[in-house]
Amino acid sequence: MSLPFVRHRRLRQSAAIRGMVRETVLTADDFIQPIYVTFGTGVKSEISSMPGVYRFSLDMLEEELKEIVDLGIPAVLLFGIPETKDSVGTSAFIENGIVQEATRLIKKLYPHLLVVADTCLCEYTDHGHCGMVHTYELDGQVCGDVLNDESLELHVKTAVSQAKAGADIIAPSNMMDGFVQAIRAGLDENGFQHIPIMSYSVKYSSAFYGPFRDAADSAPQFGDRKSYQMDPANSREAIRESESDVAEGADMLMVKPALSYLDIMRQVKDRFDLPLVAYNVSGEYAMVKAAAQNGWVDEKAITLEILLSMKRAGADIIITYSAKDAARWLAEK
Ligand code: PBG
């Protein structure tokens, strides 16, 4: 028997040598922490399907922000729970909307913490869709079509109002056609040429958003999002979506969800030179939490491995509900 002369284990024999040859490193400045904000006072209510994630009223936000800043996390992503909803999502674009108020507060308290505003209507519409709908009855059931071009104007208004409130980055997640182009034009016309667009370019119609819809109370009241979000079966379509976003002026691309779509992330990364964002969504977080609470997995090890795999697949930035935990664990090492 001849002994192997190629030995991969030579570079694995100590922590020091493994450290030197490590290809991917996770750091706190890769992360964006999502935050749910709501009106009222004294509210810090845990989302039942997302242990450790809360809805905050604005007066309760400061402590949370301090923790985020102290951990070295550079950005937060805001989701709002409005007081009232209507068919066009007016609360998304009013001057005193919840996200606008939260943005002003954050920029006052922590001017260097980046505020990323999720630009969508589903949390603000009474029907829970991401745009304006035309409803009709079919066989006694309410149905609806989400109107593309009519919705764009509402998304532009929302983005502009968020930028006016001080948002540093606009992140449109509505998946209408032409939304990047429309929002870019709207921002530019209003003097916000310098505000980048982080486009949710490749957003799948996914069961992994379940806990988010509890948290933001944004489940569609009829139908589903399959006519605007992507079919999980498709990957070439992800390239077409990214291509059009690049052409329309997106500054960053995103793949969402992340864990089941690492192949897509790698393909997008290889084809496009823009920074790539992974969204480690609510359902991915909930699965890990549930298993960890049962003692079935090692929460710290598995969370860091999941986040590392996203970076290895090509993500430059990771939006994750685990940002604070992960930053804390990385600092311990
Ligand atoms: C808004 C939006 C959603 C998420 C982010 N922005 C929900 C959806 O499309 O239904 C999901 C985020 C998560 O699951 O963590 N359209």
Image (spheres, grey):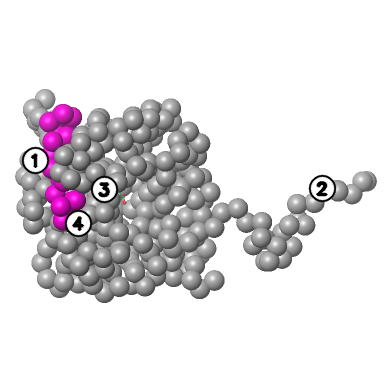
Q: State which quarter of the image contains the C terminus.
A: bottom right
Q: Label 3, secondary structure: give it.
A: loop
Among the two numbered marks 1 and 3 on one chain, the one whose residue lies closer to the N terminus: 1
Among the two numbered marks 1 and 2 on one chain, the one whose residue lies closer to the N terminus: 2
Residue 27 visible somewhere in the drawing? yes
Does the magenta stretch mainly form a helix, a strand or a loop? Answer: helix
Residue ID for mark 1? 88
Give the residues drawn in magenta, as a range.
145-165
Residue ID for mark 2? 6
Query: Gap in Å between the C-alphas at discs 3 and 2?
Result: 51 Å
For badge 4, the amino acid type reads: Gly
Q: Residue at x 45, y 35 (%)?
A: 272
Disc number placed over residue 195 in the picture, else none = 3
Q: Label 4, secondary structure: give it.
A: loop
- Mark 3 touching mark 2, by CB under 8 A? no
Residue 67 place in picture, x, y as percent: 33, 72
For badge 2, the amino acid type reads: Val
Among the two numbered marks 1 and 4 on one chain, the one whose residue lies closer to the N terminus: 1
For badge 3, the amino acid type reads: Ile
Where is 145 relative to 198, above or below?
Answer: above
- Left or right: residue 206 versus residue 3 is left
